[in-house]
Image (cartoon, rainbow, N blue to C red):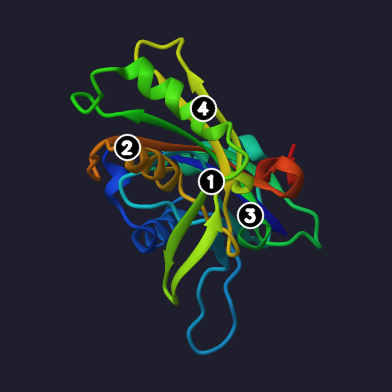
Amino acid sequence: MKIRIKFAKHGTMKFIGHLDVMRYFQKAMRRADVNIRYSEGFSPHQIMSFAAPLGVGLTSNGEYMDIEVHSTGSSAEMVRRLNEVMVEGFEVLSYRRLPDGAGNAMSLVDCADYTVRFRNGYEPEDLEGFFAGLEAFYGRESIPIVKKTKKGERQLDLKPLIYQLQVLREDERPAVAMRVSTGSTDNIKPELVLETYCREIGMEITPLTFEVQREEIYAPDFVPLEALGEDIE
């Protein structure tokens, strides 16, 4: 049976890299007594895969992992059992059964939602002017950039890879909500969009300027990965 688990990552856990997250969940499966399936051979390992590794320093409300199990309790029971063994900073949000022929989460990733805020003390003096300029920047027909990759540099138009960009002004700390292409072909980070804009307006930024939180990951046609499964009663 294929299972898709959605979880959140917050607090100090944002400093834990992907490989350590994977090792942690392998241990959590044993502690929660999940009847997880193991691979065959001389070095069996838990059958487990993650949708899209989250960068170090980012928080998230929408991370996904797929596992295979021999048997299972209900979704509500398994969420409870897993959360009982979670450390502070990790929370399991859902546990859903996938159809037998479902592709794994990693292969389905198409785009993701992010919320980006300035860290306290890093806001520009004219915050409203910054956001108004950003909205105008997004309104252009094209946003050409040179993107650095492992194979060198390549010309890229950011505009068609930014599906949504909206400034959220209701909160005391305004934020930018962004939906960008994510996956193996065109993996765009929200930081790249903001860095491009800041470079254009001559604003200096550092790796500490922005707080970035991933909100959701989608399959093609903007379907949340969670929606591809169903709760177990």
Classify 10 Å Cα crowding around label 3: few (below 14), some (14-19), many (20 and above): many
Q: Quarter of the image for the C terminus: give it.
A: top right
Q: Nearer the viewer, mark 3 or mark 1?
A: 1
Identify residue for label 3.
Answer: 109
Kindly give the residue lying farthest to the bottom in the view shown: 42
**At label 3, which amino acid type do we have?**
Val
Pick the residue in front: 212 or 145.
145
First in sequence, mark 2 or 1: give its number. 2
Is 149 located above or below residue 71 in the figure? below
Residue at the image position 60 percent from the left and 60 percent from the top: 106
Residue 192 relative to residue 201: left or right: right
Residue at the image position 31 percent from the left and 44 percent from the top: 13
**At label 1, which amino acid type do we have?**
Ile
| Residue 75 position by quadrant | top right
Determine whether the residue tagged by mark 1 lies in a helix, strand or loop. Answer: loop
Identify residue for label 4.
Answer: 136
First in sequence, mark 2 or 4: give its number. 2
Identify residue for label 2.
Answer: 88
**At label 2, which amino acid type do we have?**
Glu
First in sequence, mark 3 or 4: give its number. 3
Is 53 located above or below residue 149 in the figure? above
Identify residue for label 1.
Answer: 143
Pick the residue in front: 193 or 54.
193
| Pointers 2 and 1 in contact (C-beta within 8 Å) | no
Pick the residue in front: 24 or 209.
209
